[in-house]
Image (cartoon, grey):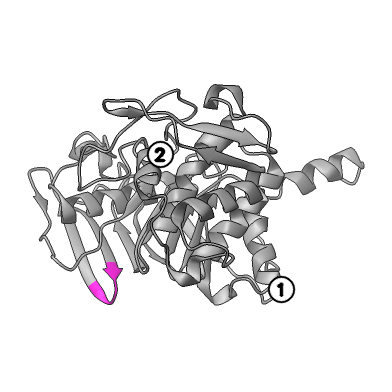
Amino acid sequence: MIQKLIIDNFKCFDKVEIPLKNINIFCGTNSSGKSSAIQSLLLIDNCLSEENSLNSKWLNLGYFEEIRNFIIRRENVNIEVEQNDSKYNLCIDEFDIHCEKKENYKTLNYISANRVGPKDFYHKITSTKNFIGENAEFLIDYLYRNASKTIDDDRMYDKQSNTLGYHVNLWLKKILNANINLDNIISGNIITANYNYKDNKAVRPYHIGAGISYVIGIIILCLSTPKDETIVLENPEIHLHPKAQSELAAFLCFIASKGIQLIIETHSDHIFNGVRKCINRKEISKDLVEIHFFELDENNISNNYAICLNEEGRILDMKKGLFDQFDNDLDELLNLT
């Protein structure tokens, strides 16, 4: 797991340290620094594991002047992570990228906000190095190939079966009352997926709610990732009803409680409150949860604030803009403002 992320002179950041635990929520208003923090992680991950470049399968950062903080303008951009008590450093200047490869570094698993949605056909895995794909396009094929593979005992929500396919459908049922069928295989490099909703007839992805197609990859990846590794998720709530978002939060807390690290960028108060409910229900310890609220100051420098929760999941240090819009709207409707 990554214990700490340090960002120096990168985009909207001056210098900031971000402690990380099992489940980490990055929240805040638009353009407050959440995505830039995620990009810093992806950048150092790419340089440590593949090539020293600002542009990769997950990133298109351009050139040095585009990533250097345009107010601070120090000569170097520095990013550091502490993973399993080892430190890894990335230093970027106008002419070079300095990053020493480390054999014991564990690469990130990443699902972006641009992940594939409903499709008639899904590509098969083309590389043994990447079972996810740039936009999670390979995860359906991964499930097909590994549906009968056993998962870790502590990731089994019930004991009726220990297979990946069973538990993917179990959680899909809990979150959206649906299940996936991958029996229809087409020769070549593509496969199809059908979904059943509320035990009705199996239909193609285009004939069922888009939320299923957007969440299925998250479920597959979370159940497949080895313990102590890190998953980065952007906007897991895409196209999901609030109830489904809350159920998804329960799933993510379940996964994090089993030793998988999750770093989640979200605008969803239902994900945020879902995590708080899991703390309240003792499904995850508050000591395994970090809430980071990002906010721009008057100089357009991003600051992050660690939001403290108590044992009941209550917020101990509320910040303006921290998922308070519902309360603000309700106060206005009730003429309380």
Judge from the rendering whether residue 317 lies leftward or rightward of residue 256; answer left or right. Answer: right
84 within the magenta span? yes
Q: Is residue 86 visible?
A: yes
Residue 59: quadrant of the picture = top left
Residue placed most toward the observer, 216 or 102: 216
Q: Which residue is mark 2?
A: 140
Q: Where does the image place residue 169, in percent across and percent down from the top left? A: 55, 48
Q: Is residue 5 above or below residue 54?
A: below
Residue placed most toward the observer, 89 or 65: 89
Residue appearing at x 46%, y 71% in the figure: 153
Q: Is residue 237 above or below residue 80?
A: above
Q: Where does the image place residue 255, in percent across and percent down from the top left? A: 50, 63
Labels 1 & 2 near each other (Cβ < 8 A):
no
SS for tag 1?
loop
Q: Which residue is mark 1?
A: 312
Judge from the rendering whether residue 257 lies leftward or rightward of residue 104; answer left or right. Answer: right
Q: Is residue 251 above or below residue 237?
A: below
The span picked out in magenta is: 82-86
**In the rendered image, which quarter contains the N terminus?**
bottom left
Q: Residue furthest left?
A: 95
